[in-house]
Structure formats: structure tokens, C-alpha cells
Amino acid sequence: MTGSILFMLIIVLGGIAWFFGRVKASRFSADNKKRRAVHSLPNYHGWYVALWTIGPALLFLMIWNTASPALITDAALTSPAAEQLPQDPFARGAILAEARSIASGQQVQAFNPLSQSMVEPYRTAISYYRTLGMVAALLLVFACGAFGWLRLKPELRARTKIERATMVLLLFASLIATITTIGIFVSLIFESARFFSMVSPIDFLFGTEWNPKAVAGPRGETGFGAIPLFWGTVFIGAIIAMIVAIPLGLMSAIYLTQYAPPNFRAWMKPILEVLAGVPTVVYGYFAALTVAPALRDFAVSIGISGASSESALAAGVVMGIMIIPFVSSMADDSIAAVPSAMRDGSLAMGATKSETIKKVLIPAALPGVVGGVLLAVSRAIGETMIVVMAAGLAANMTANPFSSVTTVTTQIVKLLTGDQEFDSPKTLAAFALGLVLFIVTLLLNLIALRVVKKYREAYE
Amino acid sequence: MNSSATFVEERNPTDWQSRAMQQRIRKRYAAERRFKALGISAIILSAGFLAFLMIVMVGNGLRGFTQTELPVEIDFPAMTGGASADQFKGANGPANLRTLGVQDIVNTSVQIQYGEEGSELFSAGGWQTVNQEILKNPQIVETKTTLYLPVESEIDVAFKGSGSETAEDMVAELKDQLSTGFNWNFLTNSDATDPMQVGIWGALKGSLITMFITLLIAFPIGVLSALYLEEYAPKNRFTDLIEVSINNLAAVPSIIFGLLGLAVFLNLFGLPRSAALVGGLTLALMTMPVIVISGRNAVKAVPPSIREAALGIGASQMQVVFHHVLPLALPGILTGTIIGMARALGETAPLLMIGMRAFIATPPGGIVEPATVLPVQIFLWSDEVNRGFVEKTSAAIIVLLLFLLTMNALAIYLRNRFETRW
């Protein structure tokens, strides 16, 4: 907690610096001789001093926080207790990690007596470096704050400097999205590479047996064939969900844009959009509690064997319903983009409204609709909670919608919840699955956007 | 050679009154009506599903806000040996109460009234209700009082609807004594193993802390990037890269953000598992693109005349943006932010990845303490076998939906109230 107190303190000191900078600068314009030379408003001088006060100290703390763990470990290793540590790097690392978490208060009891002996050196090292960091940061606050304050002159171009700093901030803020994208990509690739060093990518991508529990040794694993998961994902997300979502979404969009009175449309559209706003965990619960048992009873009553209470159909139908507003709003947009001359022409020829829609509007809007459907598919296959709660865990390769299948997202959740060892192929497999999911959704999105864009250009 | 003029075909004008034509028109009109009916039925089906979902959740969930109670007569003066009400007033109250041994007092009273097996009728944590009563109104320890305590979960389920056979029998036996009261514990307690004692306050508090962190990070970054991209960014490859990554992030499945949080925040930075801080950071990365995209639209909607007027009277580029464009675009940005936050509030999957699914029996006290959030709590309860959890899960869903509804209503209000059409 000391970290956040220090942070607060620095911010407060920055506020004080702002005040003093402002006070000093407002004297400039009071003095008639200096008045003509003043470049910036007092406010900007205040910000200038505040920036000098806060900036270097925060930068220092950021660097310090990344560097100090290594320094602390080094310091702790020079203590006499460290001589008893085993030479094996893995065992050594485990003991040090345990000792560190006890010393910083995250863990109470040590499992290894050796780590207990290392706790004290760690504790002293941590408190030593923490105090050092705090003192240095505070010194920096005062030194740089004073430096900035002393530099305040009527001629100081404080506004230009502040604006330049703001510009850097703006650029940095917009870079975060790029950093995040890169971060996702790198972390997935990195962890997947570790997985593929244990399991061959061919076995993973084309194997048909998924059973991570059966894995025993560090080499020659079986049970990581992901084809059943891919099939389950496609079956639920791209087949069943779309069979529900495309007709319902398309017909709703057509009715709302072509037939419905404006009043009805104004009410109905937001109501349908609520379907997309309901949290997926609610859909999942609904699918598992109400839809799945009903479908199972139905299947049993018409004599389908192998009906499971965790059926692909229940998850798919509910997911399809969640996707309806998505399909419908994309269809809405693309139908609206068809030039009205085409529609009017058809109507003038004597075609009925439905004939115009079926033979003119939909064919013309088709690329946009297809793009929308692709986006909807990419959303459906990345959807997690509905399938986790309603689709089951059995990796079946079946086309029977009443039986249980599993999906990529379900298995990611399954592999990463519960006991985690970070080097086992079981945990790393989740990242490989995540990588596949990421790449597939990315491709689907790119293709969909391109299709939509091409088609927009065609009518412009 | 064949000039077009020679090709005029001799045709009889169509006889619209003929039977064949009339039939054909009837058929076409029938197809028109069918198509229209298809459209309206698609809408009715979708809206009907939504209504069905709501009815099921409310129907199941409203019962979760009530509890079945049995009266217990407690003779405090006899059992406590004359404790005075003053002991339980003020700051020392809770400490003194602990030494009183309320649990034993309640157990004995129950056994006196309902026989040896009486304790089995009541929820195991029910005596805590007595604790709360004493703290609320210390006077009762000087008198003989009748308090209503929550019954055991099976009986509760049986009384409200359909339970197991043995529980139904018990309900039939106690019929005239059982009563229904509002379940305040549901709003003030945290997770527990006994469905009669669970509450949503812990999860709700976790959600609020997480949302606060999300807002704190995603809002400034989102607004600043939107301003940069709309107002300053030069048209070059670098800007394209930023735009592409923002649009991509908005379409990345949420579970991938969970994997990122796990790999980077937990394993690389070593932040504590299950903490609201990590959850908030992960959700912030997810919400930020939504804010950027809506923010850009809002900034774009501010007419250039405003910028030119400000520039014309000598404002710098930065002053134009921060003093004029941003305040005018703010309602639109806020609308987008609220919608993004509502999505983050309902998000479950990424939080499961970073371990916010632990059993948390006390509300989190800070941003690095283990916490859970409302949707995850719903997920955890939905996995419980005990039938008493069904109505609690639905009740938690009602609370979550109410929050989302409020946020969306606020967004619509903001849009209608402040949005200017230029």
C-alpha cells in the first residue's frame, strides 16, 4: 500500500507546485515593465512547474519498479542463508519465489524450510530498496520542482511546452491500442511456441482425439488433437446459431425497414437491440436452466437416442438469438445503402413490395449482408459463457444437434480454471487454442470489412 | 439488316379481367401477404424470446428476494443471566456480542420450542440474524422476544414451490407457523455455502471496484486517442496502424483479453490473482476501443465552424480542441462510455481467466484483495447443485439486469438531453 500512498503524495505535491507556479507567474503581468514580455497565461506556468515536479519522479518510479526485483534478489543472495540453496536453477527459483511472496505478505506459510530461512534476507532487502526508492523519488520531486519553478520567467514559452507535452500524451494514449494488439499477439505466440515445443503442431491442428487429461510424459503426448473442438465451434457458432440468426435477423430488418410504420419501428428496434445487451452469462444460465432440458425432453419424446442435457442445439439456438440484433442491424445498413432508384424502378414496373425486396433489394444488398453474417460468425465462435454453461465438455465429432459437443472457448476456460501449473502442456494448450481463435476471428473480420467496403464503393 | 422497326410484335393487350390473370394477381398478393407475415413473425419471435427470458428470470428470481421464516421465542434474561442492553451499544457492541454466545442461545431456544431435532429446521447461519437484531435494537436482550429466523434451504424451496418429498411433509406440518419475509441478507451478505445465507453485496462491491478501475483507465485513454486520431493525426501509415488496431481490438473475442491478462498482468508483471485491479485493467483494454470509436464519432460531429471561429480569435490548436471541441463532444463521448461500461459490467469470460472465480466470503476491501464480480458470481451459483441456488442465481441476474438497464437508460437520457444537431 505504500506505493499508492507515495503516488498520492507525489500528485498532491504536483498540485502544490501548480499553485506556486501560478502565483509566481501572475506577478509577472502585475509588473508593468515585464508585462509586455509575458508569453503565456499564469495557468500554463503552473502546469509547467507541476509537470516538472511529477514527471521525472513518476518516470523514475516506473523504472525503479521494474528494476528493483532483480536488485532485491541479488541482495538477498549475498546473505549467509543463501549458501544452503541448491544449485539446480529450478529448485532455487521455486524457493526464492516462495520466500519473496512470504516476505511481501502475499503468502503466510512456507512449504519448504529453506525458503523460510530466506524470508528474513528478503524482507530486509525489500524494505531497504523500498526506502531507497521512496527517498530518491521524493528528492527528485523537490529538485525538479524547484528547477522548474526557478525557470519561470515572463519570456518562458510555457504554453508551447505544455502543448508539446500534451501532444506526447495524446500520441501515447493512442499507441496503447497498438501496444495491446501487439501484446495479445506476442503473448499468444510466445506461450503457443512453448506448447508446440512439447506437442507437434500437426498433431494439434489435425488430430482427432481431444483428451488432455490422458497426457502423461513430457514427450510424445497424445490427446491434443483439436479437430473435435473446431468442429464443435463451427457446429454451434457457424451452423446452428446462424440457422437461427440469419432468417430471424434478416426478416426483422426487412420488416422494420420496408413495412413497419415509423412508430412501430421506433419502439421495436431498441427492444430488439436489448437482445444484444443482455450479458452472455444470463443467456448461458437461461440455456442451461430452461432451453436445454426442454430440448432434451423433446428429443426423448420423438425418440432420438443420445439426447444430452448439454446439447449443441440449446447453446446454438440461444447464441443465435443473441446474434439476431447484430445480423439485423448489418442487414438494415446494407439495405438502406441500396440506391432508391433501383427500388423505385422495380416498384414502378408493377412489382409488389415483396417481389422488389426478394428480386432487387436483397441481391443488391447481398455483399453487405454476407459481410454482416461473417462478422456475426466471428462473434459467435468467440462467444464463451453460453457454450461453457450449456454445451458441455465432451469432445464429440457428431452432427447430432441433441448430443453434447465442446468448443474452443469452453476448453480454454476448462484448461485455465482450476489447478494451474504454468509449464504443463495442459495450461499452454489454452494459449494455442486462443491463438487459433484470435487468428480466425481476425481473418473473418478483415474479410468481412473488405467485402462490405468493396460493396459500398460499388454504389458510390 | 433486320432493322429494329420490323420487329414490333403484334400482341393483344393483356386482359386483366381474365380468370388466369386474376388468379395470378391473387397469387402474387398472397405471396406478398405471406412475406409480410413472415417478417412480423420474425419480430414477434425475437421479441417473444426476450419476453420469455425476462419472465423466466423474474419469475424465478423474485422468490430469491424473500425467505421463509419460523418464529423462535428467545428468553434472553434467563439465557444470558441478565445482560444489559447498554453492553451492545456503541463501538464495543460487536465484541461484547461475541462473548455472549448467541449461537448457543438460539440453539437452546430452538430445541425448547421445536424439540431435539429442531435445529435441523433452521438455516445453519440463521443465528446471525439474531446478532443483527441485537445490534440494531439492544433493548431486546432484556426481554423475552419472538424473532423470525430463516429456515433450512430445502424447506424454503418446498414452501415457495416444489421441493423434495420429506421437505414437503415438513412444510405441511409447520404450515401455519411458516411465514415469508424480505431477505435482507441477500443484499448485505457475500458468497456462502448455504443458499439461505448467500448475498450479492460482496460481488456487487467487487463489480463496483472493478468498474471504477476500468473507467479510470479506459476513459482518459479512450478520449485522448479519439482526440488525437480525429484532430491531430497525420494521414500516414503509422496512423493507419493505430486505426486498424483499434478496430481490431473492438472485434477480438473477450476471452482473448482474459488470456492477455493472464499472460501479461499475472505472469509477467506478477500482479495478485483474483484482484479487482487486474480485472479492471483487463476490462479497460476491452472497453477502450468502444470509447475511442464512439468518441471519434462525437468529435467528428462537432462542426468545423466552431474550430475555425476559435482559431480565428487567436486560440492555439490545443486550446481549440480542449476548450471548445472536447466540451461539445463530451455528451456523445459519455454516451459511448456508458454503453462500453455496461458491456464490461456484464462480462464474465476474461475475468474467469484471471482467477476472479474464487470463493469470496467477505467483500473486498481494496483493489488488490481477492474479489469476484456479479456476472462471475452468477456463473458460480449456476454451478451449484443445491436447489436453493436456482432462485438466488436468478435474483442476482435481476440485480445485474437492473444495473444494466439503469446504465443504458442513462445513456439514452444523456443522448437525448445533450446531443446537439448542428
Image: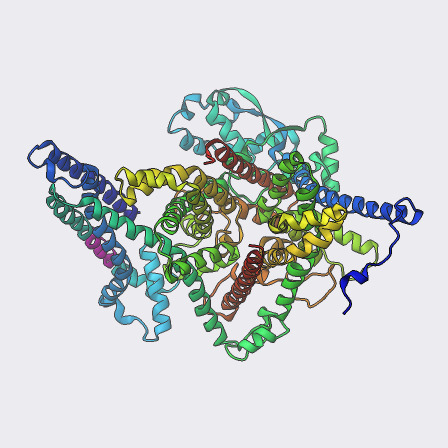
A273 lies left or right of A438: right
Front residue of B100 and A316: A316
Q: Using the rendered image of the protein, determine whether residue B81 is visible from the camera's viewpoint.
A: no
Q: Quadrant of the C terminus of chain B?
A: top left
- Residue B206: image location, x then y, percent: 46, 43
- Residue B97: image location, x then y, percent: 44, 31
Front residue of A219 and A350: A350
Q: Is residue B78 above or below residue A173?
A: above
Q: What is the image's colouring?
A: rainbow
Q: Is residue A218 above or below residue B371?
A: below
Q: Is residue B347 above or below residue A116?
A: above
Q: Which residues are magenta?
A: A123-134
Q: Specify the quadrant of the image occupied by residue A263.
A: top right
Q: Main secondary structure of the magenta part?
A: helix
- Residue at the bottom extreme, as displayed: A220
- Residue B378: image location, x then y, percent: 57, 46
Q: Is residue A223 magenta?
A: no
**Residue drawn 68% across and 52% down?**
A361
Q: Specify the quadrant of the image occupied by residue A391.
A: bottom right
Q: Is residue B184 above or below residue A314?
A: above
**Residue drawn 49% across and 29% down?**
B132
**Residue drawn 51% across and 79% down?**
A219
